[in-house]
Image: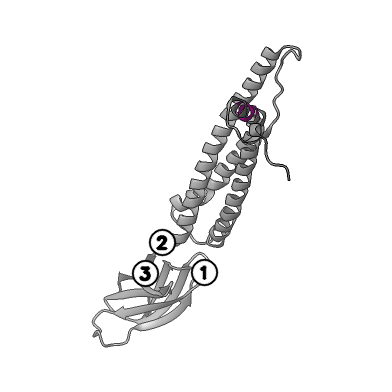
Amino acid sequence: MAAPTLEEVMINDLYWFARARALVDNAILSREEAAAKLLSAVGWFWTVYSTVAIVGTAIADTSFSWWVAVALALPAVSLLFAYLLGLRVLMPHDGCFDRQSPTEIEEACNAILGLKKRRLKVAVGATIVAAATVVGAVLAAAVTSPATDQTLSARFRPAGDEGRLVVAARVQAETDVVVSVRPEGTTPEARPVEVIERSSKRGDVRSDVAVPLAGSYEVELEWVDDDLTRSVSKNVPGA
């Protein structure tokens, strides 16, 4: 192998002129390559978002906070815009110049390079915003459980020597709910009237409980949500 010449190892004006020429030659190509990498990043973020969206769809039957819905939907728009802006950088742009005029050729190249720079900056900004929305969606899906409207309504209906207590509630979806009714005047040790109901996909619970006649009733619903026991109660006037 031949030893390098003195010109090849010297860092002088010719060296820097050669470096400048390489930079100019690759100025447009390097920005297009950067745009291609941005598109790959957007594709990766879309994969992450798709997983989060599947989780959001899985819990769609249960109501959740409006800001969670916005956080889950926003990345779809931001990622689409980021992708389109990345493609915009790669779109060809034909400059008008006289092929026999070096000055016009230089001006046309500078104009195309400036256009690519501006479009790339916009695409980078859009990708950063899209990435932030994906992170927001991931956090929303990770730390926010579907909001359950824990509502309870009940009314007493006389039926001869006893009464019927009609109970309607909204709790955790598709779970067993213990409906407990304690008539007024009973001791705390006395066992209340209990029935077990199954909530619907939207968390609705309906129950018609036979109870002894009393002035009022303490109605309580109890269920398990993520290994936590939750309950909601209400005092209902009776006979």
Q: Which residue is mark 1?
A: 200
Q: Residue 193: where, in percent of width, then height? A: 36, 83
Residue farthest right in this picture? 99
Q: Is residue 41 visible?
A: yes
User: What residue lies at 25% left-to-right and 84% top-to-bottom?
Assistant: 186
Between 58 and 32, the residue placed more toward the observer is 32
Label 2 sits on a secondary structure element that is loop
Identify the mark nearer the N-term, 2 or 3: 2
10 Å crowding of disc 2: few (<14), some (14-19), many (20+): some
Mark 3 and mark 1: Cα distance apart in space:
21 Å
**Residue 8 image position (x, y, % from top left):** 65, 34
Q: Amino acid at mark 2?
A: Asp
User: Which residue is painted at 47% across and 67% down in the image?
Assistant: 204
Camera-near label (3 vs 1) is: 1
Measured as percent of width and height from the top left, residue 230 is found at 37, 72
Above or below, comparing residue 95 to residue 169 in the picture: above
Q: In the rendered structure, which amino acid carries the disc numbered 1? A: Ser
Q: Tell me whether circle 2 and circle 1 mark residues in contact (CB < 8 Å).
A: no
Work out whether residue 157 can be spotted: no
- Viewer-closest of 51 and 216: 51
Crowding at dot 3, Cα within 10 Å, few <14 / some 14-19 / many 20+, comes out as some
Q: Quadrant of residue 114?
A: top right
What SS does tag 1 mark? loop
Inspect the image, locate mark 3, and give the three-letter code of the amino acid beneath it: Arg
Closer to the eye: label 2 or 3: 2
The residue singled out by tag 2 in the image is 149
Q: Which residue is mark 3?
A: 155
